[in-house]
Amino acid sequence: MYDLLYKAWKKERENVDVQTLPQDFYAKLADYVKRIKKERRMLDEKTAKARLMQREFVNVRKTVSELVQLRYEKTLQNTLKEKTMRGVGLTSEEEKLVEGVSLLVEPYHLLAKDILKGHLSHVKRKEQPKKKLVRLLQEVPAIVGSDMKTYGPFKPENIATLPSENARILIRQSVAVEVEA
């Protein structure tokens, strides 16, 4: 597992875009760290094996931190630039995090667009509908809505009632269309 981690870290450092990881990468990595910790606890700290395990753990901790930080920075930059991150090498855990970031970023983009149109309709709006009815155009994994509830997973042509913030993001990404009730 260490070799896989190192290769992923190196590839991420050498490339501008987020690199594809296996969907179960983080789960396997967590199991690997758990195994190292368990094995370290069972060893006498004075043995060579214990020192090697300690060094391995330090290296893993540093590499994981850097890998996650690199991926976070790339993903955040793309989200801020309004680039769609779905299907570009993110794990399912990362896709859920990106959806949360998108909820924060979208209002600022709408503010800039409104100002350039000469009005502030999005800022003036007092009460938006809490939910929107949408028809999904493609497969979407389960998402955590702005109300902290889980929605999905969805298949093409599914109809769903989602929190309006989540529905707007899916519509903007051409993953769903609003259904008029």
Image: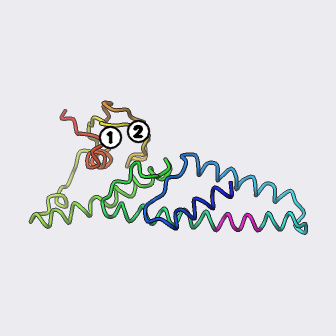
Estimate how packed mark 2 is, as few (under 14), some (14 to 19) or many (20 or more) residues with alpha carbons within 10 Å.
some
Q: Which residue is mark 2?
A: 151
**Which residue is at a point 61% across and 62% down the rendered structure image?**
64
Q: Amino acid at mark 2?
A: Tyr
Query: Which of the pair 138/19 is nearer the observer?
Result: 19
* Marks 1 and 2 in Cβ contact (< 8 Å): yes
**Which residue is at a point 22% across and 49% down the rendered structure image?**
128
Measure how far apart labels 1 and 2 are at the Cα level.
Answer: 8 Å
Q: Secondary structure at mark 1?
A: strand
Query: Which of the pair 104/28 is nearer the observer?
Result: 28
Q: Which residue is mark 1?
A: 162
Q: Is residue 164 left or right of residue 97?
A: left
- Magenta portion: prevailing SS class: helix
Q: Amino acid at mark 1?
A: Leu
Magenta region: 55-62
Q: Secondary structure at mark 2?
A: strand
Figure quadrant of the C terminus: top left
Task: Give residue 119's position: percent from left, percent from top.
Answer: 10, 63
Which residue ends up furthest to the left in the rendered image?
118
Task: Give residue 13's position: percent from left, percent from top.
Answer: 52, 67
Task: Give residue 114's position: percent from left, percent from top.
Answer: 15, 62
